[in-house]
Image (spheres, grey):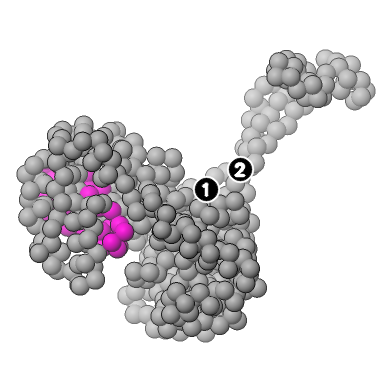
Amino acid sequence: MTTINLHELAALDEAQRQALLARTEADLSTFLEPARRIVEAVREEGDAAIVRLAREIDKVELRPDGLLATEEEFAAAEKALEPEVKEAILYAVDNIRRFHEKQVPEPMWLEEIRPGAFAGERWTPISSVACYVPRGKGAFPSVMMMTAVPAVVAGVKEVIVLTPATPEGGIDAASLFAAKASGVGKVYRVGGAVAVAAAAFGTASIPKVAKIVGPGSPWVVAAKRLLADHIDTGLPAGPSEAIILADATANPDLAALDLLIEAEHGPDSSAYLVTDCREVAERALARLPELIANLGPQRREFVSKVLGGPRGGIVLAPSWDEALRFVNDYAPEHLEVLSDEPFAHLGGITEAGEILLGENSVITIANFCLGPDCVLPTGGWARSFSALGVYDFMKRASIGYVTKAGYGELARQARVLATYEGFEAHAQAVSPLRDRLAGRTES
């Protein structure tokens, strides 16, 4: 019999409330030291460490010269997939590309801030990126598409994919097909902390890249934390998490149904149904055992551990304001709002990686094929990070241009501020000395 938590928010003290907000990656103490050893091994031994660690950790046999997927593997993957799977991937890629093409900024803008003084920005793609596609609890061609498509749309010159090998040493067929459909041809069979280290340092087979993006296990999160000085680790994307926010008009059965979506990712996931309506909470609670029983043994085990463990269940708030406060304090990766008038609640939501409005805007659809990116900040980082997008694969350079006519006023004001801050060379560079050296009189 599955035990499902029902947390009465009004009855919790502050420590108990804070415990509900905690995530798996909040405590990486058991992962950091072994991850450090893995990172150092890859730094020192390169491909040899990748092969050795695959054998020791994952029980997978790899070859140093066989880490990169071959053209034959891409062709075999396309041949092996059912037509409906290929159609779904192509459909999703098209939607994801359309969405991200709308994000592409103007290459450059320049405005006259003051007479003769121009300022603006120029956008350019970063030089190289690794898209990390996890595989620990299943295959994720969706993550392949969601990371690779915006990188390609942004114009990144070198896009590679790092993904764990299958138990047989291969690469998931749907993921290979999705990579090709997304415009990426370099897929390496390497995962976990090993992959992050390989991207950070480079090996004989795997190029060193400027950035790594994509979700992963606590091992991946720990390696990213250790390597933040060597590679841009992008937005924090750890184990899956979701809140289903339901008001009194919500269908409790749908609330229960959707609560299982992110909970089935694994026992390190987090999932809450948050409501201020006791009837919705109790009816959802009554429905959940039946819905959980419909799942296969592995997913049923995952869901049961999440909803009966320290990071899941139903949260009953004493008021709608308190329900919103809990959501914003939690800052979930995925937020699904179930209500007859979901847009009426949008203004009260300030912290979430994505906000899906209404019973038809199911997390499943957003995860796979709606278009917005499903790689989202976890661990409460939605307070300061956004969903993965084209901007994550580009950088801005400020542009400035001052004419002779505009120089005088700017120089006078800058000299005052430089002098006040005690920067003598700064002040000298815009003093009358400059005019004499330039062969002009001070304007």
> Is residue 252 highlighted in magenta?
yes
Q: CA distance from mark 1 to mark 2?
A: 9 Å
Magenta-tinted stretch? 243-272
Left or right placement of residue 391 versus residue 83 in this view: right
| Count of numbered circles in the view | 2
Q: In terms of image quadrants, where is residue 114?
A: top right
Q: What residue is pinned by disc 2? A: 396
Figure quadrant of the C terminus: top right
Q: Earlier in the sequence, mark 1 or mark 2?
A: 1
**Picture coordinates of residue 442 (x, y %)?**
85, 15
Q: Is residue 425 above or below residue 295?
A: above
The amino acid type of the residue labelled 2 equals: Arg
**Picture coordinates of residue 171 (x, y %)?**
45, 77
Q: Which mark is residue 391?
A: 1
Q: Residue at x 70, y 33 (%)?
A: 400
Label 2 neighbourhood size at 10 Å, few (<14), some (14-19), many (20+)?
some
Callout 1: SS: helix
Q: In terms of image quadrants, where is residue 14?
A: top left
Q: Residue at x 74, y 19 (%)?
A: 422
Q: Is residue 183 above or below residue 310?
A: below
Label 1 neighbourhood size at 10 Å, few (<14), some (14-19), many (20+)?
many
The residue nearer to you, when weighing 64 against 259, is 64
Instruction: Using the rendered image of the protein, determine whether residue 68 is visible from the camera's viewpoint.
Output: no
